[in-house]
Image (cartoon, helix red, strand yellow):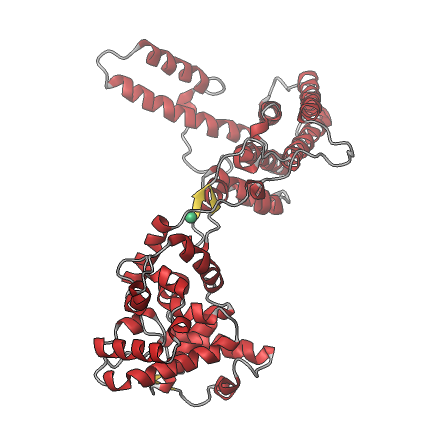
Amino acid sequence: MLAMGSAPFVFVNWARDSLPDYLWVAAQLHGGKQRVLTTAVQLDLASVSIAEHVTQMPSEWVLDGTLSSFEQLPEPARSALLGRLDATGTYEDFIPEELAHTLALYEGAPGAWLVAPWIERGLVADASTAEDWLRPIVAAALDGRASLATWSKALTIRQLMQAGRVHFGENIGFLELLPRYPFDTNDDETARVESSLRAMFNAIAPKASTDWPRAFWRSNWRLFECEWPDAHDAAETEVTPAATTDAPTLHDYLRDLQSRAQQLWDTYFEAATTTSPDLYDPDRFEVLTGLVGRAVRYVLSFTQTPPMWTMEHGAPILRALLETEIVFRYLLHTEGDEPLYAKFKTYGAGKIKLLKLHVEEHIDSLDTPPEDLLQYRDYLEAVVNRDIYEEFQSVNLGGSFSGVDTRRMSQAVGMESDYRFVFAPASSNVHGEWGVIDENVFTTCANPLHRYHRIVAEPSPTLIGASFVESIMDRATDLVQRYVAEIARGGNTPPA
Ligand SMILES: [Zn+2]
Protein backbone atom coordinates (compact mmCIF):
# COMPACT_ATOMS: atom_id res chain seq x y z
CA MET A 1 0.00 0.00 0.00
CA LEU A 2 1.54 3.27 -1.09
CA ALA A 3 0.67 6.52 0.55
CA MET A 4 0.36 9.38 -1.85
CA GLY A 5 1.25 12.86 -0.83
CA SER A 6 4.58 11.87 0.62
CA ALA A 7 5.86 9.94 -2.38
CA PRO A 8 9.34 11.00 -3.42
CA PHE A 9 9.85 12.21 -6.96
CA VAL A 10 11.50 9.59 -9.12
CA PHE A 11 12.62 10.44 -12.60
CA VAL A 12 11.18 7.96 -15.06
CA ASN A 13 12.59 8.09 -18.56
CA TRP A 14 9.19 7.43 -20.06
CA ALA A 15 10.20 7.25 -23.71
CA ARG A 16 13.18 5.02 -23.16
CA ASP A 17 12.19 2.81 -20.26
CA SER A 18 8.38 2.75 -20.14
CA LEU A 19 7.03 3.18 -23.64
CA PRO A 20 8.20 -0.21 -24.98
CA ASP A 21 6.14 -1.88 -22.24
CA TYR A 22 3.13 0.27 -23.16
CA LEU A 23 2.91 -0.67 -26.82
CA TRP A 24 -0.44 -2.43 -26.41
CA VAL A 25 -1.84 0.45 -24.38
CA ALA A 26 -0.52 3.12 -26.73
CA ALA A 27 -1.86 1.22 -29.73
CA GLN A 28 -5.32 1.08 -28.14
CA LEU A 29 -5.33 4.73 -27.05
CA HIS A 30 -3.91 6.07 -30.30
CA GLY A 31 -7.48 6.16 -31.62
CA GLY A 32 -8.24 9.22 -29.49
CA LYS A 33 -9.71 10.30 -26.17
CA GLN A 34 -12.80 8.09 -26.47
CA ARG A 35 -10.51 5.07 -26.51
CA VAL A 36 -9.55 5.69 -22.88
CA LEU A 37 -12.94 4.38 -21.81
CA THR A 38 -13.13 1.45 -24.23
CA THR A 39 -9.61 0.36 -23.33
CA ALA A 40 -10.49 0.46 -19.64
CA VAL A 41 -13.53 -1.70 -20.41
CA GLN A 42 -11.35 -4.12 -22.40
CA LEU A 43 -9.06 -4.49 -19.40
CA ASP A 44 -12.03 -4.95 -17.05
CA LEU A 45 -13.46 -7.73 -19.23
CA ALA A 46 -10.05 -9.34 -19.51
CA SER A 47 -9.69 -9.20 -15.72
CA VAL A 48 -13.03 -10.93 -15.26
CA SER A 49 -12.10 -13.72 -17.64
CA ILE A 50 -8.85 -14.50 -15.85
CA ALA A 51 -9.96 -13.78 -12.28
CA GLU A 52 -9.94 -17.35 -11.05
CA HIS A 53 -6.40 -17.90 -12.33
CA VAL A 54 -4.70 -14.86 -10.83
CA THR A 55 -5.32 -15.36 -7.14
CA GLN A 56 -1.71 -16.35 -6.60
CA MET A 57 -0.12 -13.42 -8.45
CA PRO A 58 2.70 -11.44 -6.83
CA SER A 59 1.33 -8.54 -4.82
CA GLU A 60 2.77 -5.89 -7.11
CA TRP A 61 1.09 -7.31 -10.24
CA VAL A 62 -1.84 -5.55 -11.79
CA LEU A 63 -3.32 -6.01 -15.27
CA ASP A 64 -2.72 -2.53 -16.63
CA GLY A 65 -2.20 -3.43 -20.27
CA THR A 66 1.56 -3.29 -20.17
CA LEU A 67 3.20 -6.12 -22.08
CA SER A 68 4.90 -7.26 -18.89
CA SER A 69 1.54 -7.45 -17.07
CA PHE A 70 0.35 -9.87 -19.78
CA GLU A 71 3.64 -11.73 -19.73
CA GLN A 72 3.32 -12.46 -16.02
CA LEU A 73 0.02 -14.28 -16.48
CA PRO A 74 0.19 -18.04 -15.84
CA GLU A 75 -0.73 -20.45 -18.61
CA PRO A 76 -4.36 -21.07 -17.51
CA ALA A 77 -5.02 -17.32 -17.45
CA ARG A 78 -3.52 -16.87 -20.90
CA SER A 79 -5.75 -19.61 -22.33
CA ALA A 80 -8.78 -18.20 -20.56
CA LEU A 81 -8.21 -14.74 -21.99
CA LEU A 82 -7.57 -15.94 -25.56
CA GLY A 83 -10.59 -18.23 -25.27
CA ARG A 84 -12.87 -15.38 -24.20
CA LEU A 85 -11.57 -13.08 -26.94
CA ASP A 86 -12.16 -15.79 -29.51
CA ALA A 87 -15.62 -16.65 -28.21
CA THR A 88 -16.72 -13.02 -28.21
CA GLY A 89 -15.20 -12.27 -31.60
CA THR A 90 -13.09 -9.48 -30.10
CA TYR A 91 -9.63 -10.93 -30.61
CA GLU A 92 -8.85 -8.71 -33.63
CA ASP A 93 -9.80 -5.63 -31.66
CA PHE A 94 -7.67 -6.70 -28.75
CA ILE A 95 -4.70 -7.71 -30.88
CA PRO A 96 -4.84 -5.92 -34.25
CA GLU A 97 -2.99 -7.70 -37.04
CA GLU A 98 -0.34 -4.95 -37.23
CA LEU A 99 0.41 -5.32 -33.54
CA ALA A 100 0.95 -9.02 -34.22
CA HIS A 101 3.40 -8.17 -37.00
CA THR A 102 5.17 -5.87 -34.58
CA LEU A 103 5.44 -8.09 -31.52
CA ALA A 104 6.44 -11.08 -33.62
CA LEU A 105 9.44 -9.12 -34.90
CA TYR A 106 11.13 -9.03 -31.51
CA GLU A 107 12.59 -12.15 -30.07
CA GLY A 108 11.45 -12.60 -26.52
CA ALA A 109 8.98 -9.70 -26.52
CA PRO A 110 6.87 -9.83 -23.35
CA GLY A 111 3.26 -10.78 -24.04
CA ALA A 112 4.22 -12.41 -27.33
CA TRP A 113 1.79 -15.25 -26.53
CA LEU A 114 -1.01 -12.81 -27.29
CA VAL A 115 -0.20 -13.02 -31.01
CA ALA A 116 -0.09 -16.84 -31.11
CA PRO A 117 -3.55 -17.08 -32.76
CA TRP A 118 -2.31 -14.82 -35.57
CA ILE A 119 0.79 -16.99 -36.02
CA GLU A 120 -1.40 -20.09 -36.10
CA ARG A 121 -3.37 -18.49 -38.91
CA GLY A 122 -0.11 -18.23 -40.85
CA LEU A 123 0.98 -14.68 -40.11
CA VAL A 124 4.66 -14.07 -40.82
CA ALA A 125 6.09 -10.96 -39.18
CA ASP A 126 6.71 -8.24 -41.72
CA ALA A 127 8.95 -5.35 -40.66
CA SER A 128 7.55 -2.92 -43.18
CA THR A 129 3.93 -3.51 -42.08
CA ALA A 130 5.05 -3.16 -38.48
CA GLU A 131 6.95 0.05 -39.16
CA ASP A 132 4.09 1.75 -41.01
CA TRP A 133 1.77 0.99 -38.13
CA LEU A 134 4.15 1.57 -35.24
CA ARG A 135 5.75 4.82 -36.35
CA PRO A 136 2.81 7.17 -35.77
CA ILE A 137 1.97 5.48 -32.48
CA VAL A 138 5.50 5.77 -31.10
CA ALA A 139 5.86 9.28 -32.50
CA ALA A 140 2.73 10.33 -30.61
CA ALA A 141 3.71 8.49 -27.44
CA LEU A 142 7.36 9.53 -27.11
CA ASP A 143 6.59 12.81 -25.36
CA GLY A 144 5.78 11.78 -21.82
CA ARG A 145 3.71 14.95 -21.26
CA ALA A 146 1.57 14.63 -24.38
CA SER A 147 -1.94 13.13 -24.38
CA LEU A 148 -1.16 9.60 -25.48
CA ALA A 149 1.48 9.06 -22.81
CA THR A 150 -0.65 10.76 -20.16
CA TRP A 151 -3.69 8.58 -20.93
CA SER A 152 -1.45 5.50 -20.81
CA LYS A 153 -0.20 6.53 -17.39
CA ALA A 154 -3.74 7.33 -16.26
CA LEU A 155 -4.80 3.82 -17.22
CA THR A 156 -2.11 2.27 -15.03
CA ILE A 157 -3.17 4.46 -12.12
CA ARG A 158 -6.82 3.51 -12.65
CA GLN A 159 -5.91 -0.17 -12.57
CA LEU A 160 -3.84 0.29 -9.42
CA MET A 161 -6.72 2.13 -7.76
CA GLN A 162 -9.22 -0.56 -8.75
CA ALA A 163 -6.93 -3.20 -7.34
CA GLY A 164 -6.85 -1.26 -4.07
CA ARG A 165 -3.12 -0.80 -4.40
CA VAL A 166 -3.07 2.96 -4.02
CA HIS A 167 -4.14 4.87 -0.98
CA PHE A 168 -4.55 8.60 -1.32
CA GLY A 169 -3.82 10.89 1.56
CA GLU A 170 -6.30 13.61 2.47
CA ASN A 171 -6.41 16.89 0.60
CA ILE A 172 -5.44 15.65 -2.80
CA GLY A 173 -7.35 18.31 -4.67
CA PHE A 174 -7.49 16.73 -8.06
CA LEU A 175 -9.24 13.57 -6.81
CA GLU A 176 -12.67 15.16 -7.07
CA LEU A 177 -11.92 15.88 -10.73
CA LEU A 178 -10.82 12.35 -11.53
CA PRO A 179 -14.28 10.83 -12.16
CA ARG A 180 -14.92 13.49 -14.80
CA TYR A 181 -11.54 13.09 -16.51
CA PRO A 182 -10.89 13.14 -19.44
CA PHE A 183 -14.35 13.76 -20.95
CA ASP A 184 -16.01 16.33 -18.71
CA THR A 185 -13.13 18.36 -17.41
CA ASN A 186 -12.42 21.80 -18.85
CA ASP A 187 -8.98 22.68 -20.21
CA ASP A 188 -7.74 24.02 -16.91
CA GLU A 189 -9.01 21.02 -14.95
CA THR A 190 -7.61 18.63 -17.55
CA ALA A 191 -4.20 20.23 -17.22
CA ARG A 192 -4.36 19.95 -13.42
CA VAL A 193 -5.42 16.31 -13.48
CA GLU A 194 -2.85 15.33 -16.08
CA SER A 195 0.01 17.03 -14.32
CA SER A 196 -0.96 15.23 -11.08
CA LEU A 197 -1.34 11.91 -12.88
CA ARG A 198 2.11 12.20 -14.41
CA ALA A 199 3.69 13.03 -11.07
CA MET A 200 1.84 10.12 -9.48
CA PHE A 201 2.90 7.77 -12.24
CA ASN A 202 6.53 8.68 -11.63
CA ALA A 203 6.07 7.87 -7.98
CA ILE A 204 4.04 4.65 -8.08
CA ALA A 205 4.31 3.03 -11.48
CA PRO A 206 5.62 -0.51 -11.22
CA LYS A 207 9.23 -0.46 -12.26
CA ALA A 208 9.41 -2.78 -15.24
CA SER A 209 12.65 -4.55 -15.96
CA THR A 210 14.86 -2.77 -18.43
CA ASP A 211 15.54 -5.92 -20.45
CA TRP A 212 12.63 -5.38 -22.81
CA PRO A 213 13.16 -1.61 -23.33
CA ARG A 214 16.81 -2.33 -24.03
CA ALA A 215 15.97 -5.11 -26.47
CA PHE A 216 13.24 -3.03 -28.13
CA TRP A 217 15.36 0.04 -28.86
CA ARG A 218 18.47 -1.90 -29.77
CA SER A 219 16.52 -4.17 -32.13
CA ASN A 220 14.99 -1.14 -33.84
CA TRP A 221 18.39 -0.20 -35.20
CA ARG A 222 18.48 -3.51 -37.04
CA LEU A 223 14.79 -3.67 -37.99
CA PHE A 224 14.21 -0.14 -39.27
CA GLU A 225 16.30 2.31 -41.22
CA CYS A 226 17.39 5.81 -40.29
CA GLU A 227 15.52 8.64 -41.91
CA TRP A 228 17.67 11.59 -42.89
CA PRO A 229 16.00 14.95 -42.58
CA ASP A 230 15.84 17.03 -45.75
CA ALA A 231 19.33 18.33 -46.41
CA HIS A 232 18.22 21.91 -46.94
CA ASP A 233 16.68 22.09 -43.47
CA ALA A 234 20.14 22.44 -42.01
CA ALA A 235 21.24 25.19 -44.37
CA GLU A 236 22.31 28.55 -43.02
CA THR A 237 21.57 31.72 -44.90
CA GLU A 238 22.71 31.76 -48.46
CA VAL A 239 24.92 34.57 -49.62
CA THR A 240 22.33 37.31 -50.03
CA PRO A 241 23.77 40.63 -48.88
CA ALA A 242 21.00 42.97 -47.85
CA ALA A 243 20.01 46.02 -49.90
CA THR A 244 20.47 44.33 -53.23
CA THR A 245 17.46 43.22 -55.15
CA ASP A 246 19.21 41.39 -57.95
CA ALA A 247 21.12 38.74 -56.04
CA PRO A 248 24.87 38.99 -56.66
CA THR A 249 26.83 35.90 -57.45
CA LEU A 250 29.31 34.57 -54.95
CA HIS A 251 32.03 35.77 -57.27
CA ASP A 252 30.75 39.40 -57.20
CA TYR A 253 30.38 39.31 -53.45
CA LEU A 254 33.85 37.85 -53.00
CA ARG A 255 35.41 40.56 -55.15
CA ASP A 256 33.61 43.33 -53.30
CA LEU A 257 34.54 41.83 -49.95
CA GLN A 258 38.20 41.47 -50.80
CA SER A 259 38.32 45.03 -52.02
CA ARG A 260 36.82 46.23 -48.73
CA ALA A 261 39.33 44.14 -46.78
CA GLN A 262 42.16 45.60 -48.84
CA GLN A 263 40.89 49.14 -48.12
CA LEU A 264 40.86 48.27 -44.45
CA TRP A 265 44.46 47.17 -44.68
CA ASP A 266 45.42 50.31 -46.60
CA THR A 267 43.82 52.55 -43.97
CA TYR A 268 45.60 50.68 -41.22
CA PHE A 269 48.91 50.62 -43.06
CA GLU A 270 48.76 54.33 -43.84
CA ALA A 271 48.24 55.20 -40.16
CA ALA A 272 50.86 52.74 -38.99
CA THR A 273 53.54 54.01 -41.33
CA THR A 274 52.98 57.74 -41.10
CA THR A 275 52.62 58.12 -37.34
CA SER A 276 55.63 58.68 -35.11
CA PRO A 277 56.22 55.45 -33.22
CA ASP A 278 57.94 57.40 -30.40
CA LEU A 279 61.41 56.01 -30.75
CA TYR A 280 62.18 56.87 -27.13
CA ASP A 281 59.40 54.58 -25.82
CA PRO A 282 57.77 52.67 -28.68
CA ASP A 283 55.83 50.13 -26.57
CA ARG A 284 52.44 51.83 -26.95
CA PHE A 285 52.74 52.20 -30.69
CA GLU A 286 54.09 48.73 -31.22
CA VAL A 287 51.55 46.93 -29.06
CA LEU A 288 48.50 48.75 -30.46
CA THR A 289 49.80 48.50 -34.02
CA GLY A 290 50.66 44.84 -33.58
CA LEU A 291 47.28 43.93 -32.15
CA VAL A 292 45.36 45.59 -34.94
CA GLY A 293 47.77 44.38 -37.63
CA ARG A 294 47.22 40.78 -36.60
CA ALA A 295 43.45 41.26 -36.70
CA VAL A 296 43.47 42.81 -40.18
CA ARG A 297 45.79 40.08 -41.50
CA TYR A 298 43.24 37.55 -40.22
CA VAL A 299 40.47 39.40 -42.02
CA LEU A 300 42.44 39.49 -45.29
CA SER A 301 42.84 35.74 -45.21
CA PHE A 302 39.30 35.12 -43.96
CA THR A 303 37.68 37.11 -46.76
CA GLN A 304 39.47 34.96 -49.32
CA THR A 305 38.21 31.73 -47.80
CA PRO A 306 34.42 31.24 -48.15
CA PRO A 307 34.46 27.85 -46.37
CA MET A 308 35.33 29.79 -43.21
CA TRP A 309 32.26 32.01 -43.46
CA THR A 310 30.34 30.08 -40.88
CA MET A 311 30.40 30.07 -37.12
CA GLU A 312 31.60 26.47 -37.27
CA HIS A 313 34.81 27.26 -39.12
CA GLY A 314 35.10 31.02 -38.62
CA ALA A 315 34.72 31.03 -34.82
CA PRO A 316 38.51 31.17 -34.24
CA ILE A 317 38.66 34.36 -36.32
CA LEU A 318 35.65 35.88 -34.59
CA ARG A 319 37.05 35.03 -31.18
CA ALA A 320 40.49 36.42 -32.04
CA LEU A 321 38.90 39.62 -33.33
CA LEU A 322 36.80 40.07 -30.19
CA GLU A 323 39.71 39.35 -27.91
CA THR A 324 41.82 41.86 -29.79
CA GLU A 325 39.08 44.46 -29.46
CA ILE A 326 38.73 43.84 -25.73
CA VAL A 327 42.48 43.93 -25.09
CA PHE A 328 42.96 46.97 -27.33
CA ARG A 329 40.28 48.93 -25.52
CA TYR A 330 41.43 47.74 -22.10
CA LEU A 331 44.97 48.91 -22.79
CA LEU A 332 43.65 52.35 -23.71
CA HIS A 333 41.25 52.32 -20.77
CA THR A 334 44.06 51.74 -18.26
CA GLU A 335 46.84 53.77 -19.85
CA GLY A 336 46.01 56.91 -17.86
CA ASP A 337 46.56 55.17 -14.53
CA GLU A 338 48.88 52.31 -15.35
CA PRO A 339 50.13 51.79 -18.90
CA LEU A 340 50.24 48.05 -19.53
CA TYR A 341 52.05 48.07 -22.87
CA ALA A 342 55.40 46.89 -21.51
CA LYS A 343 53.63 44.30 -19.38
CA PHE A 344 51.78 43.02 -22.44
CA LYS A 345 55.11 42.49 -24.21
CA THR A 346 56.90 40.84 -21.30
CA TYR A 347 53.96 38.50 -20.68
CA GLY A 348 54.29 37.16 -24.22
CA ALA A 349 58.07 37.18 -24.12
CA GLY A 350 57.95 35.20 -20.87
CA LYS A 351 55.99 32.45 -22.62
CA ILE A 352 58.69 32.29 -25.31
CA LYS A 353 61.39 32.28 -22.66
CA LEU A 354 59.73 29.29 -21.02
CA LEU A 355 59.59 27.50 -24.37
CA LYS A 356 63.28 28.31 -24.90
CA LEU A 357 64.12 26.81 -21.49
CA HIS A 358 62.25 23.61 -22.38
CA VAL A 359 64.06 23.42 -25.71
CA GLU A 360 67.43 23.88 -23.98
CA GLU A 361 66.58 21.19 -21.48
CA HIS A 362 65.72 18.85 -24.31
CA ILE A 363 68.94 19.70 -26.14
CA ASP A 364 70.94 18.94 -22.98
CA SER A 365 69.35 15.52 -22.79
CA LEU A 366 70.52 14.58 -26.29
CA ASP A 367 74.01 13.27 -27.12
CA THR A 368 73.99 14.85 -30.58
CA PRO A 369 71.18 17.37 -30.86
CA PRO A 370 70.07 17.93 -34.44
CA GLU A 371 71.20 21.13 -36.11
CA ASP A 372 67.70 22.46 -36.75
CA LEU A 373 66.89 22.16 -33.06
CA LEU A 374 69.95 24.27 -32.22
CA GLN A 375 68.87 26.83 -34.79
CA TYR A 376 65.41 26.92 -33.28
CA ARG A 377 66.98 27.55 -29.84
CA ASP A 378 69.00 30.47 -31.31
CA TYR A 379 65.90 31.89 -32.95
CA LEU A 380 63.94 31.78 -29.69
CA GLU A 381 66.87 33.38 -27.88
CA ALA A 382 66.89 36.30 -30.29
CA VAL A 383 63.12 36.79 -29.90
CA VAL A 384 63.26 36.65 -26.11
CA ASN A 385 66.12 39.14 -25.87
CA ARG A 386 64.78 41.63 -28.34
CA ASP A 387 63.34 44.21 -25.91
CA ILE A 388 64.76 43.26 -22.55
CA TYR A 389 67.63 40.92 -21.74
CA GLU A 390 66.17 37.70 -20.60
CA GLU A 391 67.93 37.68 -17.24
CA PHE A 392 65.68 40.64 -16.37
CA GLN A 393 62.53 38.87 -17.51
CA SER A 394 60.27 36.78 -15.35
CA VAL A 395 57.92 34.10 -16.58
CA ASN A 396 54.33 34.93 -15.70
CA LEU A 397 52.23 31.78 -15.77
CA GLY A 398 48.98 33.65 -15.08
CA GLY A 399 46.14 33.50 -17.58
CA SER A 400 46.47 37.10 -18.74
CA PHE A 401 49.08 39.81 -19.16
CA SER A 402 47.01 42.21 -17.07
CA GLY A 403 46.14 39.83 -14.25
CA VAL A 404 42.50 40.48 -15.19
CA ASP A 405 40.56 37.85 -17.11
CA THR A 406 38.93 38.57 -20.44
CA ARG A 407 35.44 38.79 -19.01
CA ARG A 408 36.44 41.42 -16.47
CA MET A 409 38.43 43.34 -19.09
CA SER A 410 35.31 43.33 -21.27
CA GLN A 411 33.26 44.68 -18.34
CA ALA A 412 35.78 47.46 -17.79
CA VAL A 413 35.45 48.69 -21.37
CA GLY A 414 31.68 48.30 -21.73
CA MET A 415 31.86 45.17 -23.88
CA GLU A 416 30.23 42.75 -21.50
CA SER A 417 27.32 41.98 -23.79
CA ASP A 418 29.75 41.30 -26.65
CA TYR A 419 31.54 38.98 -24.27
CA ARG A 420 28.32 37.16 -23.36
CA PHE A 421 26.71 36.94 -26.76
CA VAL A 422 29.67 36.67 -29.11
CA PHE A 423 32.93 35.92 -27.36
CA ALA A 424 31.61 33.16 -25.09
CA PRO A 425 29.85 31.19 -27.86
CA ALA A 426 32.84 31.65 -30.16
CA SER A 427 35.05 30.31 -27.36
CA SER A 428 32.78 27.31 -26.85
CA ASN A 429 33.18 26.68 -30.53
CA VAL A 430 36.97 26.97 -30.48
CA HIS A 431 37.16 24.65 -27.46
CA GLY A 432 34.87 22.11 -29.14
CA GLU A 433 32.24 22.00 -26.41
CA TRP A 434 29.34 19.59 -26.74
CA GLY A 435 26.74 22.11 -27.91
CA VAL A 436 28.93 23.02 -30.85
CA ILE A 437 29.69 19.42 -31.72
CA ASP A 438 25.99 18.61 -31.46
CA GLU A 439 25.01 21.49 -33.69
CA ASN A 440 27.57 20.94 -36.40
CA VAL A 441 28.50 17.29 -36.56
CA PHE A 442 25.05 15.77 -36.15
CA THR A 443 21.56 15.94 -37.45
CA THR A 444 18.52 14.15 -36.07
CA CYS A 445 17.23 10.88 -37.46
CA ALA A 446 13.57 11.50 -38.23
CA ASN A 447 12.48 7.93 -37.53
CA PRO A 448 10.60 7.93 -34.19
CA LEU A 449 11.34 4.21 -33.88
CA HIS A 450 14.97 5.28 -33.46
CA ARG A 451 13.98 7.66 -30.65
CA TYR A 452 15.28 10.68 -32.60
CA HIS A 453 18.94 9.82 -32.08
CA ARG A 454 21.78 11.77 -33.61
CA ILE A 455 23.23 10.79 -36.95
CA VAL A 456 26.30 12.25 -38.58
CA ALA A 457 25.36 15.09 -40.90
CA GLU A 458 26.90 15.38 -44.32
CA PRO A 459 29.22 18.36 -44.44
CA SER A 460 27.87 20.77 -47.00
CA PRO A 461 30.31 23.11 -48.73
CA THR A 462 27.57 25.58 -49.64
CA LEU A 463 26.41 26.58 -46.18
CA ILE A 464 27.90 30.03 -45.97
CA GLY A 465 26.41 33.09 -44.38
CA ALA A 466 26.88 36.68 -45.48
CA SER A 467 25.71 37.91 -42.08
CA PHE A 468 28.63 36.19 -40.37
CA VAL A 469 31.12 37.72 -42.81
CA GLU A 470 29.55 41.16 -42.43
CA SER A 471 29.75 40.98 -38.65
CA ILE A 472 33.47 40.21 -38.93
CA MET A 473 33.92 43.10 -41.36
CA ASP A 474 32.01 45.50 -39.10
CA ARG A 475 34.13 44.60 -36.10
CA ALA A 476 37.38 44.84 -38.02
CA THR A 477 36.35 48.20 -39.48
CA ASP A 478 35.49 49.53 -36.05
CA LEU A 479 38.83 48.33 -34.71
CA VAL A 480 40.80 50.02 -37.47
CA GLN A 481 38.88 53.28 -36.98
CA ARG A 482 39.64 53.22 -33.28
CA TYR A 483 43.26 52.52 -34.06
CA VAL A 484 43.54 55.41 -36.46
CA ALA A 485 41.88 57.75 -33.95
CA GLU A 486 44.05 56.63 -31.04
CA ILE A 487 47.33 56.54 -32.92
CA ALA A 488 46.76 59.94 -34.51
CA ARG A 489 45.72 61.48 -31.21
CA GLY A 490 48.45 63.54 -29.58
CA GLY A 491 51.17 62.22 -31.87
CA ASN A 492 50.91 58.81 -30.24
CA THR A 493 51.73 60.00 -26.77
CA PRO A 494 49.71 58.63 -23.90
CA PRO A 495 47.85 61.33 -22.01
CA ALA A 496 50.03 62.81 -19.28
ZN1 LIG B 1 18.05 6.42 -37.02
Closer-to-camera residue (261/278):
261
Left/right of residue 293 with respect to residue 453 in the rendered view? right
Q: Is residue 61 above or below residue 125?
A: below
Quadrant for the N terminus, please: bottom left
Left/right of residue 251 with respect to residue 435 in the rendered view? right
The residue positioned farthest toward the bottom in the image shown: 170
From where the camera sits, is residue 392 visible? Answer: yes
Instruction: Kindly identify the residue that appears in the image at 37 percent across and 60 percent down.
Output: 101
Left/right of residue 247 with respect to residue 153 in the rendered view? right
Residue 166, position in %: x, y?
Answer: 36, 84
Instruction: Kindly identify the residue that appears in the image at 46 percent across and 69 percent down.
Output: 149
Closer-to-camera residue (373/92):
92
Q: Is residue 74 above or below residue 399?
A: below
The picture quadrant where one finds residue 254 is top right
Residue 219, position in %: x, y?
Answer: 33, 53
The picture quadrant where one finds residue 319 is top right
The residue positioned farthest toward the top in the image shown: 371
Instruction: Kindly identify the residue that appears in the image at 33 percent across and 57 percent down.
Output: 124
The picture quadrant where one finds residue 385 is top left
